[in-house]
Image (cartoon, rainbow, N blue to C red):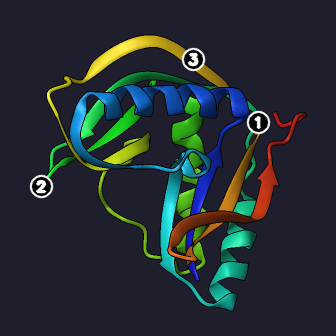
């Protein structure tokens, strides 16, 4: 199983992300855009995992305690690549998100997972291999309260990339 831990969005936020991607698509000459149902924020990519590793990931997630927090999306940006850039919606600086990431990666490391060493840059991928004359920009923030994280399985079903939540850990409302 190819697994990752993510934050998924409610229909209102997903709709706003789709609008951003649609606008970018209309101004691009090339690109592979994320399916609306696949728009998410990856916290940790785990890669290929067996059943024991999936269970360990669930245990690590359950051991991380966090309270609900606001997450705001505020920019359109890109990672430059030959053959077309990866375009994304950027997240406003967020201490609660950074702490959740740090706590989660620490716990996953305790379970033997190898965590990427590069700096965590929270973003929502809108598309890949995009050729456009659009420039990165800020826009009026929008967002939602985050009250859960999910273990996601990535697979191709009938040729279509599909992400499925296989486990969920909710925030603690009375967490101190």
Outermost residue, right side: 174
Q: What residue is disc 1 on?
A: 67
Which SS class for mark 2? Answer: loop
**Position of 120 compared to 166: left or right?**
left
Q: Residues within 10 Å of mark 1 (few under 14, many from 20)?
A: some
Quadrant of the drawing holding the C terminus: top right
Which SS class for mark 3? Answer: strand
Q: Residue at x 53, y 68 (%)?
A: 160
Quadrant of the drawing holding the N terminus: bottom right
Q: Residue at x 36, y 65 (%)?
A: 116
Q: Earlier in the sequence, mark 2 or mark 3?
A: 2
Q: Position of residue 174 (x, y in %)?
A: 90, 34
Q: What residue is disc 2 on?
A: 83
Decide: is 24 above or below 4: above
Frontmost of labels 3 and 1 is: 3
Q: Which mark is residue 130?
A: none
Labels 2 and 3 touching (C-beta < 8 A): no
Q: Position of residue 104 (x, y in %)?
A: 59, 57
Q: Which mark is residue 142?
A: 3
Which residue is more in the foreground, 55 or 90? 90
Labels 3 and 1 touching (C-beta < 8 A): no
C-alpha span from label 3 to label 1:
20 Å
């Amino acid at each position: 199983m190819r697994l990752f831990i993510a934050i998924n969005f409610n229909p209102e936020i997903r709709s706003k992300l789709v609008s951003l991607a649609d606008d970018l698509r209309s101004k691009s000459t090339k690109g592979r855009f994320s399916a609306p149902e696949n728009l998410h924020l990856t916290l940790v990519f785990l890669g290929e995992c067996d059943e024991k590793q999936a269970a360990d990931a669930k245990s690590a997630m359950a051991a991380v305690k966090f309270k609900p927090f606001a997450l705001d999306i505020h920019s359109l940006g890109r990672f430059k690549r030959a053959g077309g850039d990866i375009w994304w919606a950027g997240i406003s600086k967020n201490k609660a998100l950074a702490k959740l990431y740090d706590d989660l990666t620490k716990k996953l490391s305790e379970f033997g997972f190898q965590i990427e060493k590069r700096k965590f840059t929270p973003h929502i991928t809108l598309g890949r291999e995009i050729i456009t004359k659009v420039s990165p920009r800020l826009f009026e923030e929008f967002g939602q309260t985050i009250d859960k994280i999910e273990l996601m399985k990535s697979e191709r079903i009938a040729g279509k990339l599909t992400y499925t939540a296989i486990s969920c850990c909710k925030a603690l409302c009375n967490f101190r």
